[in-house]
Amino acid sequence: MMFEQLPWAGQAKCLQAEPDTFFPEKGGSTREAKRICALCDVANECLAYALANDERFGIWGGKSERERRRLKKAAS
């Protein structure tokens, strides 16, 4: 299922922002993406989706790939 087709995705703040903000170059800043996620009503759903689907790139639910790996490891 595509992200835009998820029931909560229409409320995602990231859809109103430049997509590159959420997929920075290696070593690039994640600050703006995380700021947008912090204001998003569906950030928890987004993070849960990323964890369940093993998203390897980008900022999802306010967390980077590294932060999501740590969450998954801590949960197992």
Image (cartoon, rainbow, N blue to C red):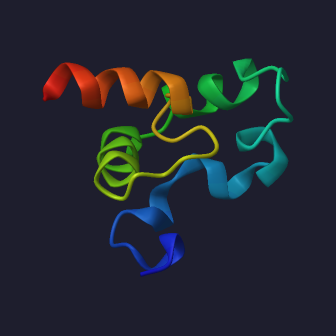
Looking at the image, residue 60 sits to the left or right of residue 18; the answer is left
Image spot of residue 4 (x, y percent): 52, 74
Tell me what residue is drawn at x 26 percent, y 25 percent. 73
Against 47, is 29 above or below?
Answer: above
Tell me what residue is drawn at x 47 percent, y 58 percent. 11
Tell me what residue is drawn at x 61 percent, y 25 percent. 34
Q: Dividing the image into 4 quarters, which one contains the N terminus?
A: bottom left
Against 40, is 76 above or below?
Answer: above
Q: Dividing the image into 4 quarters, which one contains the C terminus?
A: top left
Going by the picture, which residue comes out furthest to the left?
76
Is residue 16 at least partly visible in the picture? yes
Location of residue 70 by image quarter = top left
How many discs appear? Answer: 0
Between 61 and 56, the residue placed more toward the observer is: 56
Location of residue 58 by image quarter = top right
Between 49 and 71, the residue placed more toward the observer is: 71
Image spot of residue 13 (x, y percent): 58, 47
Is residue 18 at least partly visible in the picture? no
Location of residue 53 by image quarter = bottom left
Between 28 and 46, the residue placed more toward the observer is: 28
Tell me what residue is drawn at x 76 percent, y 49 percent. 17
Looking at the image, residue 25 sits to the left or right of residue 68; the answer is right
Image spot of residue 38 (x, y percent): 50, 25
Image spot of residue 31 (x, y percent): 72, 18
